[in-house]
Amino acid sequence: MTTLEVPTHLNEYILQYLQNLVARRGNRLDPSNRYQRIVAAALLEIFTTNYAQLSVPAVAKRAGVSTATVYRIFPDHYALYKAGHQLGLELYLEWLSADCTHPNPLMRLAILSDRRVQVWTRPLAMEACSPTYFMICERDPSLDDHSKPYVDHFANFWISQFRRLKTEGYLDLEPDWHLVEMFWGPIECLVFYTTVLTDRPYVSETSKFEDCWRAVDDFLTLYGTPYFHTLRKKLSWDKALSAYQTGNSL
């Protein structure tokens, strides 16, 4: 999948993937193919309803198999839910990991940040991208075991993004975990803390993307190199936000 083909919204990405998986042709009697279709169908059901309403007959119908086949592979609702949930987590990380090659670093970081804010604002997935949650997990071994794959993914992804900025000459700071925290702090304060600590859902006055853009703007205004600021003015990078607001490409 190329960068341009990555859907802007998480829901769109997951639905496209699952619908393609459920409709996959080939030998429908092949055990691996059948298993994949059932798990994808289960996640579609979870995605459109919830765990409490997970219906095995509905999953079987989506997957094109019998109810008996589903029960033969998954002995109960929990086993079916667990497989669907695991696929969902994998899709979250795949979508979050999709690269963005936009030449404008403001737009590029805003797009990548917006993806994570979309995940954050889904209640069941909110903790999956928070540096604060990761620090809590370090003090609790049981939580740390659960969160380590997401910690590693989150840190490695953003350090690679900052390393790219440094290679491009836009940033002089060392790409490390400290820099990740510096970048994400304002976004966490806006999105994560209000929802988790006060139970008041985050609602943007404009849009999630524009909130991310402003956080990126503040970060690069403070820490961007003179070369970045020169190109920002020369290439009119700030016009990208106006283009986004009017629905035009730039």
Image: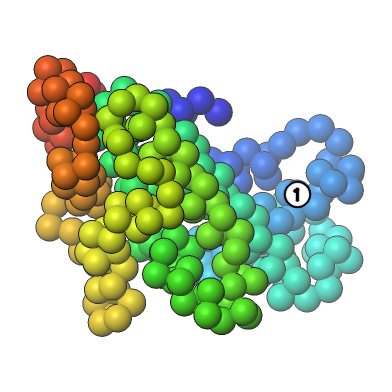
Give the position of the C terminus as an image quadrant: top left
Q: Amino acid at mark 1?
A: Gln
Residue under pointer 1: 36
Q: Position of residue 118 (x, y in %)?
A: 36, 54
User: In this view of the protein, which residue sits in the foreground, 174 or 210?
Assistant: 174
Q: Is residue 212 visible?
A: yes
- Residue at image position (75%, 71%) is 79
Q: Quadrant of residue 150?
A: bottom right
- Residue at image position (20%, 24%) is 227
- Count the numbered circles shown: 1
Compared with residue 114, is residue 45 higher up or lower down, i.e. above or below? below
User: In this view of the protein, which residue sits in the foreground, 139 or 126?
Assistant: 139
Q: Quadrant of residue 231?
A: top left
User: In this view of the protein, which residue sits in the foreground, 90 or 133?
Assistant: 133
Q: Secondary structure at mark 1?
A: helix
Q: Position of residue 9 (x, y in %)?
A: 39, 45
Q: Is residue 7 visible?
A: no
